[in-house]
Image (tube, rainbow, N blue to C red):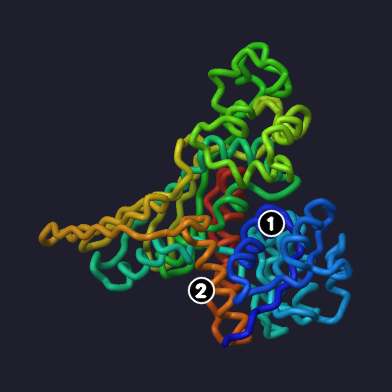
Amino acid sequence: MEQTVKAILLGAGQRGAQVYGAYALRHPEEIEFVAVAEPDAARRAEFCRDHGISPENAVEDWRELLSRPCMADCAFVCTQDNQHIAPALAALDAGYHVVLEKPISRSTAELAALCERAHSTGRLVTVCHVLRYTPFFSKVKEILDSGVIGQVQSIQQIENVAYWHQAHSFVRGNWRREDETSPMILQKSCHDMDILLWMAGSHCAKVSSFGSLGHFKPENAPAGAPDYCLDGCPAADSCPYNAEHIYLRDTGVHVPVIRKVVSLDDTDEAVREALRRGPYGRCVYHCDNNVVDHQVVNLEFDNGITASFTMCAFTWEGSRTVKIMGTHGQITGDVEENKIRVVRFADGDTQVYHLDGGLEGHSGGDKGFMEDVVRQMRTGGVYAGGTGVDASVESHRIALAAEESRVTGRTINMKDFA
């Protein structure tokens, strides 16, 4: 019987507790969390109860946990975006392999420092680029490598953020302000930069980008809209961003996970009370958000492949669509539908693949990622997995270059970007 991987968790929020922690609860023979650092007492207590963690191994500050002798194989760093790099470096120094929630950092100097520390300690840093582990993108890469569509010339990818997700995370939520966290193109779409690098099979040479905060601004508020949705908004019935509509009504929106963000007690009564004066109950036109709600990125790779990427809030679905154009054929697909269509130019031969993404998050990517982490830890890093730290850092540098291009209006040469 293979060993159970031991892990510690730094940050028991939505990803840390409800994704990686939840996987451990479903697969206790694979991975076990033995300690947690989380500043929110209620979330810390819930994680300890669910995972049977003793009180002495539950602390408020990650520094305290990492000052102790190494007690596990790996540390999951799932703190807030602008608090990733310090615990990651400290965990490497303390003897842990690191599983690091994205984004790593918005600082190119810190990105370089993480690479250097990972290499000098000889330990793994596995960034949570879960899209590589979806059945969808795994199959796309397999098809590309088969050569059936010839030499790839251009790639189009769209991230359909979904109207409710934008309102929840990037208008009302933790990622609404670039100055407090990171640019949205980094936080939301470093996944996509990683996938584009993977599919192109080449380093990125040039980046340009355009986008703005177009809609979620005070001037677009309905007449008479109050600061909080539950305070009798005259547009309550027609506004798709009404907090009551998103969190308390059966509208087809997948809300169980995001309700736990609004209130740890996710009963209707508790959620309603949290919305009255909490951040998730605010009118989307009266928040302090400043990240974009739509952005496009153009990329040119060293091997001549070009790519265009669009991130947009104003979609019903929360998914990604892709079209890859080669000299002998094309690939089109939808991640959420787990459907891929391959057409060969010479004879029109068409192959359609219907994939099983399972019930886990990110269209099966969360499950695939955690299975990969377990394999890495069980082999002590001999099995390196799908995404090394150097590739992850490159995806982040592309996202940061895209943001610089958006702000300055310049095309960025990646060789000169620092």
Say which quarter of the image contains residue 277: top right
- In the image, farthest residue toward the left: 347
Mark 2 lies on residue: 386
Element assignment for label 1: loop
On the question of residue 393 being in view, the answer is: no
Residue 13 picture location, percent across and down: 72, 54
- Near-viewer residue (86 or 265): 265
On the question of residue 124 being in view, the answer is: yes
Say if 52 sits above or below 343 in the image: below
230 relative to 323 in the view: left or right: right
Say if 35 sits above or below 305 in the image: below
Q: How many C-alpha atoms fall within 10 Å of the one at disc 2: few (<14), some, or many (≥20)?
A: some
Residue drawn 47% across the image and 60% down it: 364
- Near-viewer residue (383 or 43): 43
Residue type, label 2: Gly
Residue drawn 60% across the image and 20% down it: 220
Say which quarter of the image contains residue 317: top left
Q: Which mark is residue 106?
A: 1
Residue drawn 71% across the image and 61% down it: 78
- In front: mark 2 or mark 1? 2
- Near-viewer residue (240 or 31): 31
